Image (cartoon, grey):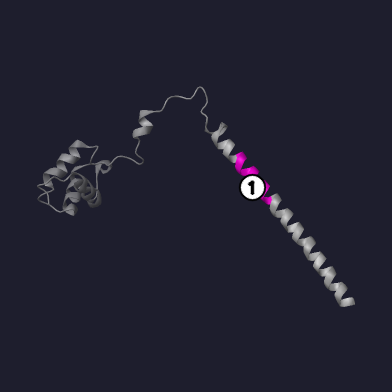
Amino acid sequence: MTGRRDVDLGLQKLREAQGLIEAAHRAQSQATDSLQRALKDALNGELTKLPADAPPPSEHRRTHKPGRPPKIASDPELQAFIAARIDRMTFVQIAKEVASVFPPARRVGKSAIHAWWQRNRREDHP
């Protein structure tokens, strides 16, 4: 009879444990639902509202491009110098010519020349 009593006790303990597990699942589900509602309310509420004194959207910010502008594109003299040589010299040769004529702050390398040429080449530059 001891074996039967042990089995019954074991089954009872399993049922109790199963009940605890189900209660924990319900509590976890309720906590998850509550947290999701709170986050949704926060995102749809105060977090997305602008202060009353916020300035209007800025044209500068709308058109802003990160980084600094390319040297060649922003220096017409350098651009004309390179354009005059682009059909007759290699990018390396042009870079050396630029280095011999322009001060260090206005110098560009072969990669910058190539990038500028790729963006600006015309149909007559295959």
Instruction: Please provide percent x and percent y for residue 105.
Output: 28, 41
Q: Residue furthest right?
A: 1
Which secondary structure is most common in the magenta stretch?
helix
Instruction: Please provide percent x and percent y for residue 53.
Output: 50, 22
Q: SS class of the residue under badge 1?
A: helix
From the viewer's side, name the closer residue of 76 and 33: 33
The segment highlighted magenta reads 28-38
Q: Amino acid at mark 1?
A: Thr
| Residue drawn where x is 36% and y is 33% of the image | 62
Instruction: Please provide percent x and percent y for residue 25.
Output: 69, 54
Residue under label 1, please give it.
Answer: 32
Left or right of residue 43, residue 75 in this image: left
Q: Is residue 31 magenta?
A: yes
| Residue drawn where x is 82% and y is 65% of the image | 12
From the viewer's side, name the closer residue of 112 and 15: 15
Instruction: Tell me where residue 16 sits by quadrant.
Output: bottom right
Instruction: Please provide percent x and percent y for residue 2.
Output: 89, 76
Instruction: Tell me where residue 78 sits by quadrant.
Output: top left
In this rendering, the answer to whether 15 lies above or below 42 is: below
